[in-house]
Amino acid sequence: MNPNHDLLTHINRAERTDIWEFRTTVTGDPRERIEQIKHVTGTWLAVKDNPQASPTLCALAVSALLKNSGYNPILTVNCRDCNRIALQSRLLGAMSLGITAILIESGIHPASGDDPHAKSVYDIDTVQLAGIAVGMSRRHQLLCGNTIDRATTLRVGVRLSPFKGNMQLQESMLRKYRDTPADFFVLETNDDMARFKKWYDSVYCKLCLSQIPIFICNSAGVKPEDNAIASQKGVAGWYYR
Amino acid sequence: MIVATLKPIDEILEKASSYRRILVLGCGTCATISDWGGMKAVRQISEMLRMARSDRMQTHDLKEFVVQRQCEPAFLDPLLNEIRSIDAILSLACGVGVQILSERFPDITVLPAADTHFIGTISNSNVYREYCRGCGDCDILQTGGVCLVARCPKASLNGPCGGEDEFGMCEVDPKERCVWIQIAERLTVSRREGFLDKIVTPKDWSRSRSGRTMRIPDDGITDESES
């Protein structure tokens, strides 16, 4: 595998591109975990950022280890744990380490996680963070206006939950991410492929999103080869938990 | 109103146990609306203190009083007579009231009897909701009069966070609907749905730092010197 791959280039060239979620434990040596996945090839690895609002090994450090081991990491960044200064610092760190893709999440609230006494930050939200990341990558500029001397390309992804709550609001979020513009979507579908198909036809195509590739969350072990969904235009592949 | 709740009675009794002469002081505004700051509550707390001390064979000297607002120094003048020969004041008020009492009477210990939570209102019996966080940069016109800073646990200014369930109930409090759904409903009713598609830029939090002192110029009401 080529660790210098660009995600969008990979998507354009490959028949299908998949993302696997990569989690570390607090105590384990991440190198052992990396050794365990040596059979995994041709995929991208999304490194979780303190999942369940519980501290784990720094996602940026793990992403760097993966990169150095020949894998293509996607750095997950949440809005819960850091303010805009620290988040931009992390993105600068990712750029300097040659990490080329990030996945933005709001982050599960501490009240619902493993450390409910923690204070949450939420200085900026996911749309704003996506806009900042795009600005850093494409305009070489920080939010405060300072210029970045050595900016590299970051592919900015966001996690979507289009079937939750109010559909009008979900469409509005999609438009905002489209206009940011985000580079890829990771879609929570609750493994409801019939609903996904309906959403794909009525919303995704209507909003002219077909240029933005989608990864469909697959938590139920749906076999891609059994499902024609993965071959829909715009669907890059699966996101495995 | 400032929403606060009385601390557990055991904690209040424990804190008060080191003092013999105590003024139990109610507050006639927010705390009274919450039903634990008026004279009725002052008498109930006093009675519990008496009972606890009787059980321990301790002597006691309790006074009872209610001022209209503990948070305003001018309202504390009637206390000047009450605080003579007092070891401590048990304050049935918010954290502002406790601090103003401490500033006004620095030689007397002020015991907080309540935990202060937020600026909000009573929705119905025993349900209090936060409505304002005092961020100093109010923009609720855009959101149909709903404050996202105070009412969304993630202060998600551009839309729902994705943590809500299929029915739109909040990730943090599943008994509450996502506040964004309320916003969408209000904007739809008032035909201002356009806001939903407007990208909101990062908020200026500089006006909501802790330890703020706001100085209003003598010749106007604008705030130009907040620090």
Image (cartoon, coloured by chain):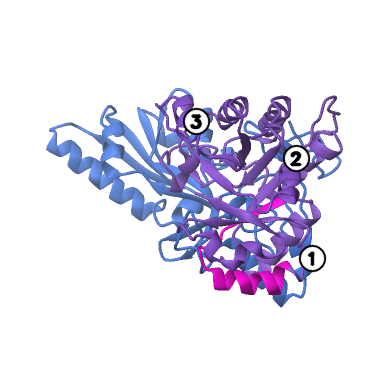
Q: Chain of mark 1?
A: A
Tell me: A98 left or right of A21: right
The structure residue drawn at horizontal position 44% and vertical position 63%, both measured from the top left corner, is B175
Marked residue nearer the N-terminal end (1 or 3)? 3
Tag 1's secondary structure? Answer: loop
Using the rendered image, report if marks 1 and 2 lie on a common chain. yes
Label placed on residue A34:
3
Q: CA distance from mark 1 to mark 2?
A: 22 Å
Query: Residue B31: which numbered mark, if any?
Result: none
Task: Give the chain coloured purple.
Answer: A
The chain painted blue is B
Q: Nearer the viewer, residue B121 or A98?
A: A98
Residue at disc 3, secondary structure: helix
Which residue position holds label 2?
Answer: A133
Is residue A79 highlighted in magenta?
no
How crowded pointer 2 is (Cα within 10 Å; few <14, some 14-19, many 20+) is rated as many
> What's the residue at 79%, 51% (across, down)?
A181
Looking at the picture, tell me which residue is in the foreground, A210 or B215: A210
Image spot of residue B99 (x, y percent): 51, 33
Question: Which residue position is annotated with label 1?
Answer: A208
The residue closer to the viewer here, B61 or A2, is A2
The Cα atoms of the two marked residues, 3 and 2, are separated by 27 Å
Give a yes or no on whether discs 1 and 3 share a subunit. yes
Q: Is residue A142 left or right of residue A119?
A: right
Q: Is residue A148 above or below residue B46?
A: above
Find out whether the residues at labels 3 and 2 contact each other: C-beta distance under 8 Å.
Answer: no
Residue type at mark 2: give it.
Ala
Disc 1 from disc 3: Cα separation: 38 Å
Residue type at mark 3 is Ile
Q: Position of residue A203 (x, y in %)?
A: 70, 70
